Amino acid sequence: MASMDRRELLKLSSAVSLAAMVSSAAGASQKPVGNEHDNVPIWEVFEATFPGPSTGNPFVDAQFTAALSLGGRTVHVDGFYDGRGSYKFRFMPDAVGTWSYVTTSNMPEISGKSGSFHCVAALPGSHGPVQVRNTRHFAYADGTPFFPFGTTCYAWIHQSQEIQQQTLESLRTGPFNKIRMCIFPKSYQYNHNEPALYPFDRDASGKSDFTRPNPAFFAHVEQRISDLRALGIEADLIVFHPYDRWGYATMSAEDDDRYLRYVLARLSAFRNIWWSLANEWDLMRAKSAQDFDRFFHIVEQRDPVGHLRSVHYSHTMYDYSRPWVTHASLQTYAFESVPTWHAAWNKPICFDEIQYEGNLNSRWGNISGLEMMRRFWLGVVAGCYVTHGETYLDPEAALDENTTPTIWWSHGGRLHGTSPVRIAFLRNIVEKSAAAQGTDAKRTGFGAQTPAYYPNANTVDASGRGTQEILYFLDFHQPLYYDFPLPEGTYTAELIDPWEMKVKALPGTFSGKSKIKLSGTPYQAVRFRRT
Amino acid sequence: MASMDRRELLKLSSAVSLAAMVSSAAGASQKPVGNEHDNVPIWEVFEATFPGPSTGNPFVDAQFTAALSLGGRTVHVDGFYDGRGSYKFRFMPDAVGTWSYVTTSNMPEISGKSGSFHCVAALPGSHGPVQVRNTRHFAYADGTPFFPFGTTCYAWIHQSQEIQQQTLESLRTGPFNKIRMCIFPKSYQYNHNEPALYPFDRDASGKSDFTRPNPAFFAHVEQRISDLRALGIEADLIVFHPYDRWGYATMSAEDDDRYLRYVLARLSAFRNIWWSLANEWDLMRAKSAQDFDRFFHIVEQRDPVGHLRSVHYSHTMYDYSRPWVTHASLQTYAFESVPTWHAAWNKPICFDEIQYEGNLNSRWGNISGLEMMRRFWLGVVAGCYVTHGETYLDPEAALDENTTPTIWWSHGGRLHGTSPVRIAFLRNIVEKSAAAQGTDAKRTGFGAQTPAYYPNANTVDASGRGTQEILYFLDFHQPLYYDFPLPEGTYTAELIDPWEMKVKALPGTFSGKSKIKLSGTPYQAVRFRRT
């Protein structure tokens, strides 16, 4: 690691202190670059820093790239200007060995610089970036299945330090392994505070200079991404969004593209990011679908890691069948449509906004914890991936949308709902399934494996081994018994109460059409596992 | 009343003994017909009986009609053969005055018979047959609004006398004013008993002669229709259905049409019937949509009262836009589609099968009482009409579909669910609304009056008086407060808890955008009434 000192290197042996590493990487580096004795674990960030000119506007004027080679392979990455005469490039090595690099620039001071580093084995708990696997599902680069259980805190990195620390603590003890979060600050109902840092330089009147990104702002973003990485949480980074009073939603195409390239140069080397090009792209009146086509192409060309790419909508879907979209990011709870959309797109589908558990005065922000739990289960058996959100207003708070209370959905802080502990229960069930344990496992929803008929079932097939596990969720139905039509094989059965979070194993084994007596109450589940 | 004796005439003064009247009318009449001293209340049944030949097959051979006249108006009705040499016609007078009649037949013994009767004022509690009113809603012939709160007991008239009496008692004390019921007996899961009476003559081997209806069977049907009439309940009569092992679902077109004409001749004079030409017409493999077109035309031509006409489906809708369909009869719980369907058909919409509260092992037969209650409220605010059903299996019963337990959905008997008392609470609210009290009231669902947006609201406008009442149902949403956008006027407000069945009046009055603090729990309602 180019910029780490001895003390920090020692920390690398502990997975829980990963945060420290990128905190350092993102800070001002004083150490010479290209130290060939540095050992960088695979999927961590290698960073090299070079002094150069600070005259003019290097954010616009400087062209700075690096070519990194291992054996016969060469990867090109964009560098970036980090202010105060400091130029950097970052790289996430994806193969063990000695990588060499050489820089190219229109500025002689930072061109033709070369060096090398050793890429060594992964840190404990590190599995690499998440990718699409088995067409409609996800896995880390090392093949470990990744089953997203996301949450949403759009503007958490723009709140007070105290709230940010509360958020991290809530995430540490919570059930989530993905978080949707904006790069830009947010201006919306219940969101009226100013951020501590702005993404661009501002003059005394508050006017932004979109040609001059603020390195301190981005260092803060990087700190939080590395904090999440230390917690094993994917940052589903929202690059543009419409909730704006500072002008970030209405920049020119040239400014948009330069900002996006800057983001890509700084952040692509973090393994735990996904690109969400917008939240509610269709509410951005100043942009068209063609603008987002262009953004996708820029990301395709300038993210050497190939992180997951999608965009989220309010009413009008972006065309998720396009080849540059890796997965769908939906605002809906129409789980019955998953088979149709799977067939149309043949990609993973994330239900990234299924309304929020809470008590706001908006339809999207006041479903019950039971309903949130129900939607997570429906997503699991439908073979898609569901994202949580919470919007509880303190009953004693002023009932005024012009205030800025702390609401998880946007600010982070503490969780108040009844669904997170049930989501943890469900995640535990899913991650202990054959699908989550075997790299050859394949998940299929009711659309793929079974007809979209009652009860909704998620069948887990392990390639070459037949059906390993079947998870039924009975939704609001409350049958007294059901004749479960088991496929070939012998199975154990468990009755699962998703709300009470209880699992009761039934005696004996089951095969063929199996009549099982149930509780006769709603929201129950049954799991069969092959013996 | 042609066939009533003195004792029975006395009973007419009491609405609760209406049942006795038709019981008599449907029995064998020995009294001379055309007694001009008879007084028949409007909307009751006038019946005239004539002796005639019993040789051959009069069900097929006899042509027998009557022309009834009042002033310059003449109404033609079909008579029918009631067995044992007895020919009858029935007529429901819809205007007060002295009606005269004359018969026509291809049999000289019953042709050219004439007589008259006096039609007098309605019995207490009688409002006439239900008709379409205000395009998408219903009212009785006297203008009293009719808001259907239906239930379903498909084969209740084919169970033991004890169960039939239990059913009548359950209906007497229950919340329902309409019942979906089959004419033919039913053969289906949990429905394996033989009926006490068959609709057609059978030989020793059990083979039916579809050319010979069984008068005793139809007299029993008429007894039950009159029992329902005495309770103020509309009989939504299902003429054909697919759940059959006797051959009634696969008769020839000629037999179908003759049966239908016989049903029309016998039953049209009962004011409390609706024609449902089939349950799940599309599951009747031997019939096509064209067959049902033909059935509709026969009903149009041979029902002089013009009772409501529809047909119910399983997967494939009949085209409810056709002019001979008076209202839609749906199997769905897609309440969000009501605005679209209202726009397409411009008719009343009955959600006649929204699944059943119960615990069966079929998706359609095991929703909770809460979910059933919820669907009734969604129907009310959507501006359509919802039909209840219940399928509870005794937890101690044999879990075997080949048995014949007593389940309300099919057999009647007793109600076990938690929804009926909540449906009664809702019906009470609705019937006390301006819509139910004023003949000029108009109901509009959220599709017509307000956008299909949260909260779902049912706005009641009384013609010329502006909005009188607005009923909001918040479904699974649990806002802590809501800014209700009231139309012009001043309103009182009440918080309604549909599950706890409590109404709490808020102090003061409200106008314009009104912020009201709510419970923050799911399934709440709010009612505004103009002061």
Image: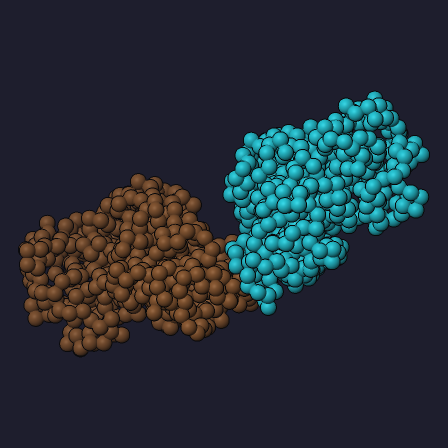
Chain colours: A cyan, B brown
Q: Nearer the viewer, residue A43 or B93?
A: A43
* Residue A236 shown left or right of residue A25 in the figure: left
* Placement of B419 over or under A78, stated as above or below: below
Q: Residue at x 6, y 59 (%)?
A: B71
* Residue B339 shown left or right of residue A502 in the figure: left
Query: Residue A37's x, y, as percent?
Result: 94, 34
Query: Residue B320's x, y, as percent?
Result: 33, 46
Q: Residue furthest toward the top?
A: A72
Query: Residue A112's x, y, as percent?
Result: 84, 23
Q: Residue at x 61, y 58 (%)?
A: A404
Q: Nearer the viewer, residue A305 or A425?
A: A305
* Residue B487 shown left or right of residue B100 in the figure: right
Is residue A118 in sight in this rendering? no
Q: Residue at x 90, y 35 (%)?
A: A32
Q: Nearer the viewer, residue B169 or A2?
A: A2
Is residue B436 in sight in this rendering? yes
- Quadrant where the N terminus of chain B lies? bottom left
Q: Nearer the viewer, residue A247 or A437?
A: A247
Query: Residue B48's x, y, as percent?
Result: 13, 62
Q: Residue at x 33, y 41 (%)?
A: B289
* Placement of A507 over or under B60, stated as above or below: below
The image quadrant of residue A324 is: top right
- Quadrant where the C terminus of chain B lies? bottom left
Q: How many marks?
A: 0
